[in-house]
Image (tube, grey):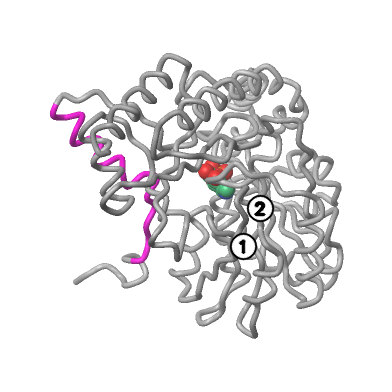
Amino acid sequence: MKPSHASSLVRYAIRDVVLEAKKEEKKGKKIIYLNIGDPAVYDFSPPQCIMDGVKKALDGPYKAYAFSLGDPELRQEIAKIEGCSPDEVFVTAGLSEGVDFGTRILLDAGDSILLPNPTYPLYPTKADVIGAKAHFYECDGKWVPDPDDIRKRIDKKTKGIVVINPNNPTGAIYPYKVLKEIGDIAAEHDLPVFADEVYDHVLLDDVEMHKMKNIVKDVPVFSGNSLSKNFFYPGARVGYVAVHHDKGGEFLDAFTRMCNQRLSVNWEFQRGAIEAYRGGFGFLEPELKRLRKRRDIICKRIREIPGLSVAAPPAAMYAFVKVEGYKGNDWDFVYDLLRSEGVLVVPGSAFYKNHPDELYFRTNLLPDKETLESAMDKLENFMKKIA
Ligand SMILES: Cc1ncc(COP(=O)(O)O)c(C=O)c1O
């Protein structure tokens, strides 16, 4: 008896590294966790209206399975934000389930999907499990995609293009011109676009966020989002995919089937999500100010440490840091840093593929000033030790 081959292909480094950190903790070491993008672990709280909505729902008629495609009022609120019909909105258990549905809808074994490099690791994992191939398109020094590289990588097996904007792990946000070029390529090759926009309100600089569905209209665009990042509520596990421009309706049918087979998303939290979307994103302004200050601390400190460099992230909640002069790979680096200093980050190769000679790690930007300064002191100390 043994587990399936497909299950052996599942990897999620962002959490896998925690196992090693827990071992160190057991030995008495204090660990600073910079590995995960969960704002609620730190001092960022969701708006109160969500919790009020959930509490009210607990006493209401929400004990049954919810509607498979999502609570009708929630679909309506999301449709307003997405500028589509509620019939085109599918509520999912976080965007993670939307990624699962989207990849399974686009891919059969032997097909391929184009992902940004670096990418969010769930996409290649899903492709692997299906028996499809993840192909990666390259980005420039500011981590903006190179449309020519996308064009080069398309072949008969390509079934879709994923755009993660703003990006995890780099925090890059893509200019209109680049998104338009990607949209034109998708239209030219008749390829659907999966637009992962889960950080679309987490903007740290005065940058504009362009939604893919407004840019490409000739092919289906799946817009993915959730409460996890924009509302600092990952534990709610409420997300959605809005399917735009699906003229034939085949993708709408496929998402409907996917939603039906998983029954439903927790109803009380969907009621909370209705309040989130009704309340809007105004609550974010002071929170983003705090996050911006933390981003600035991290970038300043990292740039002062010999051997480290970083492109300042204009959005999201991560920095993707380049390491030079270390003798070993990124996993060795991460575990050495953990054992030596008690700082936990994520190896860059979890996100960044086909560049074995370059060493990166991802840190989040989320802890308070004191914790960040202490983590940066330890990182500086470690870099001195290995120099
Ligand atoms: C780019 C990206 N997409 C999707 C997700 C999944 O988010 P959730 O399932 O919490 O909505 C994440 C989580 O970190 C992410 O960074």
Secondary structure beneath disc 1?
A: helix
**Mark 1 vs 2, N-terminal side:** 1
Camera-nearest residue between 111 and 272: 111
Secondary structure beneath disc 2?
A: loop
Q: Amino acid at mark 2?
A: Val
Q: Residues within 10 Å of mark 1 (few under 14, many from 20)?
A: many
Q: Identify residue for label 2.
A: 144
Q: Which residues are magenta?
A: 9-27
Magenta residues, dominant SS class: helix
* Distance Cα–Cα, label 1 vs label 2: 23 Å
Counting from the top left corner in percent of width and height, residue 156 is at 64, 85
Residue 102 numbered mark, or none: 1
Counting from the top left corner in percent of width and height, residue 198 is at 64, 43
Looking at the rendered image, the quarter that the N terminus falls into is: bottom left
Residue at screen point 76% across, 61% down: 221
Camera-nearest residue between 43 and 154: 154
Classify the position of ligand 1 by quadrant: top left, top right, bottom left or bottom right.
Answer: top right
Q: Is residue 189 left or right of residue 199?
A: right
Residue at screen point 30% across, 50% down: 331
Looking at the rendered image, the quarter that the C terminus falls into is: top left
Question: For residue 56, which quarter of the picture?
Answer: top right
Magenta stretch encompasses residue 21: yes
Residue at screen point 60% across, 51% down: 141
Counting from the top left corner in percent of width and height, residue 104 is at 56, 68
3 w.r.t. 145: above or below: below
Q: Residues within 10 Å of mark 2 (few under 14, many from 20)?
A: many
Q: Residue placed farthest to the bottom in the image? A: 156
Q: Is residue 93 visible?
A: no
